[in-house]
Image (spheres, rainbow, N blue to C red):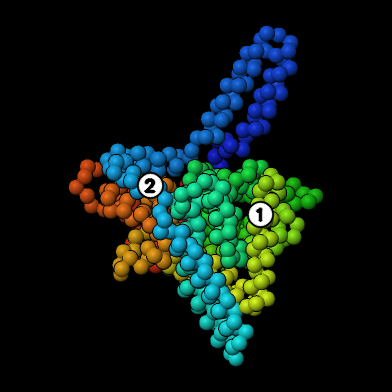
């Protein structure tokens, strides 16, 4: 009944060892160098070791290398696709509209609950509005903020983009800013290579792979979980709600029907996601008060300073919403931010399936998947704000989200469409058929969860 996690890799995560290894080499080599000329050889060896460690730090995960190889193969065959790269001025107005609409609906929800004679009916109405409209607007905001991070939303320097990323992340309850600022770009480099233990124990400013933080709710992870030692004992336990629910309660046995497994696992996933999102909202207030994020105590001061700044601005805006619109406005925002990650919203299908373990034509692992629901009128693309073209995005992170469908249209054989062009190399071709039904995708993701690799 329990999920068996893959064995921990024998190769430690190189970036975590860089500074300590350099200190060790030089601390051992320096005294010897003062005693004899042979010490120069030690220094040379130390320098060579440091260079090799820097190379290891820059090395990308196998999944990232696979996407890079696909990108080269696609551009070699279709060099004109290079024109899709760059910024797209259409996306920033979409972000401003989504945020303004979200704020307006939050105020409307707050006023509705304050003036309603039937509180129960109004609560149901606010919840429905938050799921349908708020969830879609929240996903739209997240998708365009993600584009802004990649530099495909706006031409400008990094400082300008970071300022826009900060201020255009509001209104929010727990928000996406921390993940985007500290964990998404590294996700592209380290896809499938980091563990929960590394993320929570790391002293680096950025997360090794930010996606691990929410993938842990639905997919088995490699490596060790985050654990803490119990006082006065030798026992270590994981305080992670996602790890404990996934490994102890999810059902992957073949005894039950797939439908029963999907319902059970889906319900457990919803519980752990909602619980953690509410905990994040509470934790933000603690960060705003004390200036430190207790979940990542090993992180440097710059990490905690940025967390505190964001939490304090968010808290001020939330207090203003509460004062002028009532608690219903905050309830609306909380439901909206969680809704699109749950099976009650179509966007969940993209969220739970974008990094499964599909197969390449030669039997290898295809670590990224897209979800194509073309009919009617391409509605699903707009609900997801084109983040469902996830394979295309990892192949071409510098192509704006509104142009991602063109990659599939103009390089069809690389994205599962019939083509008269020559075949794709077997190690780069995705053999697993692309999903085209969002409900079936949600069902499969919970009935047969795949590891995050």
Residue at horizontal 60%, vertical 79%? Answer: 110
- Which type of secondary structure does the marked residue at label 1 adopt? helix
Residue 311 placement (x, y as % from top left): 66, 60
Mark 2 highlights which residue? Answer: 85
Q: Which residue is located at x 60 percent, y 45 percent?
A: 206
Residue ID for mark 1 = 307
Q: Is there a contact, CB below 8 Å, between mark 2 and mark 1?
A: no
In front here: 15 or 185?
185
Q: Which quadrant of the figure has residue 75?
A: top left
The percent position of residue 324, horizontal first and vertical second, equals 65, 77
Q: Is residue 361 visible?
A: no
Which residue reaches farthest right? 232
- In this view, the residue farthest toward the left is 420
Whole-angstrom CA distance, mark 2 to mark 1, is: 32 Å
Q: Is residue 435 above or below residue 53?
A: below
Question: In the picture shown, does residue 176 fall above or below 22?
Answer: below
Q: Residue furthest bottom?
A: 117
């Amino acid at each position: 009944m329990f999920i068996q996690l893959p064995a921990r890799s024998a190769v430690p995560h190189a970036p975590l060892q860089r500074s300590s290894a350099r200190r060790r080499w030089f601390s051992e080599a320096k005294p010897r160098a003062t005693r004899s000329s042979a010490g120069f050889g030690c220094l040379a060896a130390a320098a060579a070791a440091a260079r090799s460690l820097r190379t290891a730090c820059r090395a990308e995960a196998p999944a990232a290398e696979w996407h890079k190889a696909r990108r080269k193969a696609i551009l070699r065959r279709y060099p004109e696709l290079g024109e899709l790269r760059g910024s797209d001025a259409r996306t920033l107005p979409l972000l401003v509209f989504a945020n303004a609409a979200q704020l307006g609906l939050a105020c409307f929800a707050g006023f509705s609950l304050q003036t309603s004679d039937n509180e129960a009916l109004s609560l149901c109405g606010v919840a429905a509005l938050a799921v349908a409209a708020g969830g879609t607007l929240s996903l739209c905001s997240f998708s365009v903020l993600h584009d802004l991070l990649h530099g495909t939303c706006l031409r400008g320097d990094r400082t300008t983009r970071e300022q826009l990323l900060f201020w255009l992340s509001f209104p929010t309850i727990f928000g996406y800013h921390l993940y985007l600022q500290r964990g998404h770009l590294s996700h592209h480099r380290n896809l499938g290579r980091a563990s929960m233990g590394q993320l929570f124990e790391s002293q680096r400013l950025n997360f090794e792979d930010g996606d691990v933080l929410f993938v842990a709710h639905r997919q088995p992870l490699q490596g060790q979980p985050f654990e803490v030692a119990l006082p006065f004992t030798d026992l270590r336990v994981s305080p992670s709600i996602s790890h404990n629910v996934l490994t102890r309660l999810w059902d992957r046995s073949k005894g039950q029907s797939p439908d029963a497994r999907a319902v059970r696992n889906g319900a457990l996933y919803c519980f752990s996601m909602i619980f953690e999102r509410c905990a994040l909202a509470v934790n933000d207030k603690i960060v705003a008060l004390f200036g430190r994020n207790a979940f990542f105590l090993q992180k440097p001061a710059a990490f905690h300073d940025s967390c505190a700044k964001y939490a304090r601005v968010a808290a001020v805006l939330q207090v203003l919403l509460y004062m002028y619109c009532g608690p219903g406005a905050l309830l609306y925002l909380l439901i909206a931010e969680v809704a699109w990650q749950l099976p009650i919203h179509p966007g969940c299908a993209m969220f739970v399936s974008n990094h499964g373990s599909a197969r390449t034509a030669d039997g290898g692992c295809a670590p990224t998947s897209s979800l194509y629901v073309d009919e009617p009128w391409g509605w699903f693309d707009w609900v997801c704000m084109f983040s469902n073209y996830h394979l295309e995005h990892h192949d071409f992170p510098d192509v704006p989200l509104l142009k991602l469908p063109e990659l599939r249209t103009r390089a069809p054989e690389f994205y599962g469409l019939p083509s008269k062009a020559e075949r794709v190399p077997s190690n780069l071709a995705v053999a697993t058929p692309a999903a085209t039904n969002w409900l079936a995708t949600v069902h499969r993701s919970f009935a047969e969860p795949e590891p995050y690799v």
